[in-house]
Amino acid sequence: MFSWLGSDDRRRKDPEVFQTVSEGLKKLYKTKLLPLEEHYRFHEFHSPALEDADFDNKPMVLLVGQYSTGKTTFISYFSSHWKMETRINLRKKKKKSSIKPQFGGDHFKYMYLLEQDFPGMRIGPEPTTDSFIAVMHGQVEGIIPGNALVVDPKKPFRKLNAFGNAFLNRFVCAQLPNAVLESISVIDTPGILSGEKQRISRGYDFAAVLEWFAERVDRIILLFDAHKLDISDEFSEVIKALKNHEDKMRVVLNKADQIETQQLMRVYGALMWSLGKIVNTPEVIRVYIGSFWSHPLLIPDNRKLFEAEEQDLFRDIQSLPRNAALRKLNDLIKRARLAKVHAYIISSLKKEMPSVFGKDNKKKELVNNLAEIYGRIEREHQISPGDFPNLKRMQDQLQAQDFSKFQPLKSKLLEVVDDMLAHDIAQLMVLVRQEETQRPVQMVKGGAFEGTLHGPFGHGYGEGAGEGIDDAEWVVARDKPMYDEIFYTLSPVDGKITGANAKKEMVRSKLPNSVLGKIWKLADIDKDGMLDDEEFALANHLIKVKLEGHELPNELPAHLLPPSKRKVAE
Ligand code: MG
Ligand code: CA
């Protein structure tokens, strides 16, 4: 157990005590966030209420890409490939596992399965998916249609009902016995074509469905074709709609073996440039370059690079089960922030409405001036502009609403959510860490998987982390919960905050840049230009040391090294 995280003497007198993270999340959601959401009709605007299945389900990976970027082949490829790695791992560990790697759901069977049950699905030379397919574990192979999925309380899809029959006819669950699917589920999606025609013929709001999934999955993999990198308007729109989930995004530049190295570098540059126009922070989104299917490389020049990239991507995906609780915690924080902003918006509109005359005109005026209202809330409550819902969409949604049913500001509801963000979440963080250390490691280690890990919050995975290290020794741990609270307000992505965001906080100490630069050098232990929660706590600790009049060391003394990084640094 990580006792050094548990020794928070600033803890309130009556903290919520939870046995498991999942139980804690459910209870916090129902008792603290849901009342705020209901009061301000959050579900009609942004996202339906969460259900138990949303907190209990396996980690999910969502594959998104244009037509023929290799999404479907990617699934079958990585499931069969992963099984192989699992087998190697089991052999290396010389451990007999009760879960034997299974080879039932390989590439051909997977394709066969769909072909068989969905004639017409395979059009043209490449397999084409025109449905959302949730690929999940099941003892018996089979297909469950969308209409049945939305009434199954054990599956996390019930709220997809709202997207209507046109969507449900294009949504299925493919169940099959498969070792990979015992730990994760994968959502395959229809390929995105360019052109308006497709949008109309779909008959449902494609971007909205993707957003729904994005909110609930653990990883979003955007696939691009290096061989023909054209990003359609619709695909750009789709990526923009996922902007709140950049932390979950990974990019795969697929089919990179089909072009020469020089051309590949140009394509990579073009991809980053295009992404820069679509997402806020393309530089922090990891791009994996390779050829993600089981065919031989067309141009083998970059084989080594592709292999390394593939390993990184696999490592990232394999870390998902372990990080699932943290992901759910993060998403609850995101949701709570949006629910707060939403409450401010709705109550502001309510305040402006006349009680008797001229309601319709005032409503029009308010909708047209929504940008100003956003601005006012932003200033009054110091909310970052990025936390606001999309203006245009909010305006459209407001048109259909009866403003007289809106509720005025009820501070009590907001205080409860603030309290949840400030205290309960920190409590759950402790539990997340405990569960991580108590559970057997769920990811493949050893052999090809040695080396630096890139997964989010991956710093705890180093070989030997937690073995024979006295965690209680780290003096920074005592104050870490306090620093964590600040850390989570600094927009961490993958558990790390950018240098710019860290600087904003660090300059508040009023220490000169020369000193802060030195502190930075000591605190950014892995030298990746970002701070994770431990590095951030360390930075704050060093600031405190300096402010108390002590000299800073030139090199970080061993006792200040966070436990998770000790072995790695040796
Ligand atoms: Mg496909
Ligand atoms: Ca760092």
Image (cartoon, grey):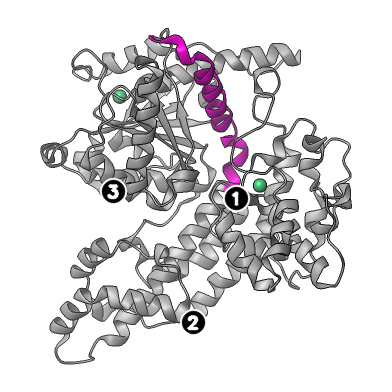
Q: Position of residue 513 (x, y in %)?
A: 67, 65
**Circle 1 sits in a helix, a strand or a loop, which is it?**
strand
Mark 3, other Cα within 10 Å: few <14 / some 14–19 / many ≥20 = some
Give the amino acid at mark 3: Ala
Quadrant of picture, ligand 1: top left
Residue 11: assigned label: none
Give the amino acid at mark 1: Lys
The residue to which callout 2 is attached is: 411
Q: Is residue 262 shown left or right of residue 437? A: left
Residue 208: assigned label: 3
Residue located 56% across and 36% down the image: 320
Q: Magenta stretch?
A: 298-326
The one of 334 and 371 positioned closer to us in this rendering: 371
**Circle 2 sits in a helix, a strand or a loop, which is it?**
helix
Q: Position of residue 327 (x, y in %)?
A: 55, 47
Total labels drawn: 3
Location of residue 11 (image quadrant): bottom right
Q: Answer yes or no: is residue 95 visible.
A: no
The residue to which callout 1 is attached is: 496
The one of 270 and 538 positioned closer to us in this rendering: 270
Mark 2, other Cα within 10 Å: few <14 / some 14–19 / many ≥20 = few
